[in-house]
Image (cartoon, helix red, strand yellow):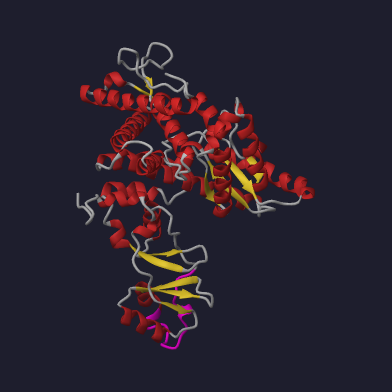
């Protein structure tokens, strides 16, 4: 497989943002510009397209070589306005949108150029079909095309893409980032569809996701962990505002469930008023949980620590993150209580080095999410929160802890390898479950793994066990 100058397989770019693959922004002209001038501008710039903008610089259309061939030659005079030949409405993507999504749009609409626009609608750059498709094998293209379809088609294509990427040799942690990106995109699309049916919200709001989706580590069928942060509004408006959000969030969570994101057994969803609050109420709630430090308060705090905004005002989410950091700094006992609770998380190894039996009935499979990933995730989260690290991803937290000297470089390397291996084993197990007609789960048949793979998994779990025990004990003072 060809590689980029950096040595990475170009297919890995699919997991990154569209902005990383875009070229320079093309020339931009007003809609009333004469076509003769527009074409001369394209020729001078050696550009195959130009943007059509309004008086504020916001993109309203695009003129491509195809547009010129179809609409200008022998049809429009040189003095005709650019608006008469441009393509509108404009199909574009955001800079932080996954490249996989951009390629799906290019394929779905038969485009050669896809503008990348900022929040104000201004063109930041251009994705060109040939360069974007260079990263994708023919087998993967069919799966990417499905990502431009409806929600059901996207969710169905997700496993095929993961399987194809693993077959291409991409690391599981990169594949999981792509899977997580698709899950986030589905949340945005379902939110938009729900809004379209319910009409404008009475106050602006931000959709928050938590848990594995917030960390960027969700696999094929994550439970829902979401909430809404509403813009503050007067108390006298509560009945009207909440009266609109109750049916809206109920519908939203049901649609997510129908799309393959099961309802959260613990009720951590936007339809639950506990997870649907104004910005001020969210800050107050965090303060309450930091003071109680027991039972449900610890469980909810553990989940909310990994929140990220998916849609809405990112500044409000950043402010909440800053507020959380202040609470953690002023109330270290909160993290100590969390560590005491997390100390019950054990790795899936027996006293004699065998793999734990977590399967009810006659089977003997091991739950490598509960008894592999979660102790590592919990320990890395606690240390990162203690050190004021803002990253929510486990791999990023480990790297940041090593950069600060909070953990040794050698240990960080072992933990990164363990994390990547656990993701790989779990993802492959979920793909195997799907192929066998089962719902993807977290129980892994370690006995069916090759001997070398079992040994590598044991070493990974031992590294996680040592790190998690030491980390939890550092907060609680208890000897394990």
Q: Which residue is located at x 42 percent, y 21 percent?
A: 346
State yes or no: residue 38 in magenta.
Answer: no
The answer to whether 477 is drawn above or below residue 12 in the figure is above
Q: Which residue is located at x 60 percent, y 27 percent?
A: 296
Viewer-side residue, 318 vs 32: 318
For this view, does 184 lie left or right of residue 462?
right
The answer to whether 247 is drawn above or below residue 454 in the figure is below
Report x, y in % for residue 420: 32, 35
Residue stretch rendered in magenta on the structure: 72-88
Residue 251 lies in quadrant: top right
Q: Which residue is located at x 29 percent, y 23 percent?
A: 458
For this view, does 271 lie left or right of residue 93?
right
Can you see residue 210?
yes
Report x, y in % for residue 81: 47, 83
Residue 443 lies in quadrant: top left
Can you see residue 154?
no
Report x, y in % for residue 253: 58, 39
Viewer-side residue, 217 vs 75: 217
Q: How many marks?
A: 0
Viewer-side residue, 190 vs 415: 415
| Helix, strand or loop for the magenta stretch, by majority | loop
State yes or no: residue 74 in magenta.
Answer: yes
The answer to whether 193 is drawn above or below residue 456 in the figure is below
Viewer-side residue, 413 vs 445: 413
């Amino acid at each position: 497989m060809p590689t980029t100058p950096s040595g990475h397989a170009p297919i890995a770019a699919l997991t990154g943002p569209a902005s990383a693959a875009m070229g320079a922004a093309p020339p931009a002209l007003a809609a009333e510009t004469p076509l003769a001038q527009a074409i001369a501008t394209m020729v001078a710039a050696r550009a195959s397209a130009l943007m059509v903008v309004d008086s504020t610089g916001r993109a309203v259309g695009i003129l491509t070589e195809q547009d010129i061939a179809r609409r200008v030659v022998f049809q429009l005079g040189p003095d005709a306005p650019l608006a008469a030949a441009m393509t509108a409405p404009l199909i574009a993507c955001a800079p932080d949108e996954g490249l996989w999504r951009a390629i799906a749009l290019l394929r779905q609409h038969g485009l050669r150029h896809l503008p990348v626009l900022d929040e104000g609608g201004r063109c930041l750059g251009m994705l060109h079909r040939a360069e974007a498709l260079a990263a994708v094998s023919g087998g993967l293209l069919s799966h990417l095309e499905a990502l431009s379809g409806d929600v059901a088609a996207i969710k169905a294509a997700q496993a095929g893409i993961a399987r194809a990427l693993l077959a291409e040799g991409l690391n599981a942690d990169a594949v999981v980032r792509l899977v997580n990106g698709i899950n986030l995109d589905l949340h945005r699309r379902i939110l938009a569809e729900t809004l379209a049916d319910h009409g404008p919200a009475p106050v602006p709001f931000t959709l928050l996701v938590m848990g594995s989706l917030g960390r960027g580590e969700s696999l094929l069928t994550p439970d829902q962990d979401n909430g809404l942060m509403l813009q503050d509004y007067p108390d006298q408006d509560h009945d009207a505002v909440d009266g609109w959000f109750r049916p809206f969030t109920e519908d939203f969570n049901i649609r997510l469930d129908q799309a393959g994101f099961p309802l959260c057994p613990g009720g951590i969803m936007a339809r639950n008023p506990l997870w649907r609050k104004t910005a001020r109420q969210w800050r107050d709630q965090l303060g309450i949980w930091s003071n109680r430090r027991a039972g449900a308060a610890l469980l909810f705090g553990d989940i909310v620590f990994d929140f990220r905004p998916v849609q809405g005002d990112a500044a409000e989410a950043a402010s909440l993150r800053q507020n959380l950091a202040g609470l953690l700094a002023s109330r270290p006992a909160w993290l100590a209580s969390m560590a005491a609770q997390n100390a019950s998380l054990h790795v899936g190894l027996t006293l004699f080095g065998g793999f734990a039996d977590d399967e009810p009935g006659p089977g003997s499979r091991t739950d490598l999410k509960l008894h592999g990933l979660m102790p590592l995730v919990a320990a890395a989260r606690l240390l990162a929160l203690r050190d004021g690290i803002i990253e929510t991803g486990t791999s990023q937290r480990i790297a940041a802890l090593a950069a600060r000297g909070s953990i040794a470089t050698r240990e960080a390397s072992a933990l990164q390898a363990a994390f990547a291996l656990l993701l790989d084993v779990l993802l492959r197990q979920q793909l195997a479950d799907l192929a066998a007609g089962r719902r993807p789960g977290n129980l892994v048949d370690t006995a069916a793994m090759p001997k070398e793979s079992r040994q590598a998994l044991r070493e990974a779990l031992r590294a996680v066990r040592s790190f998690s025990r030491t980390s939890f004990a550092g907060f609680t003072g208890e000897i394990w």
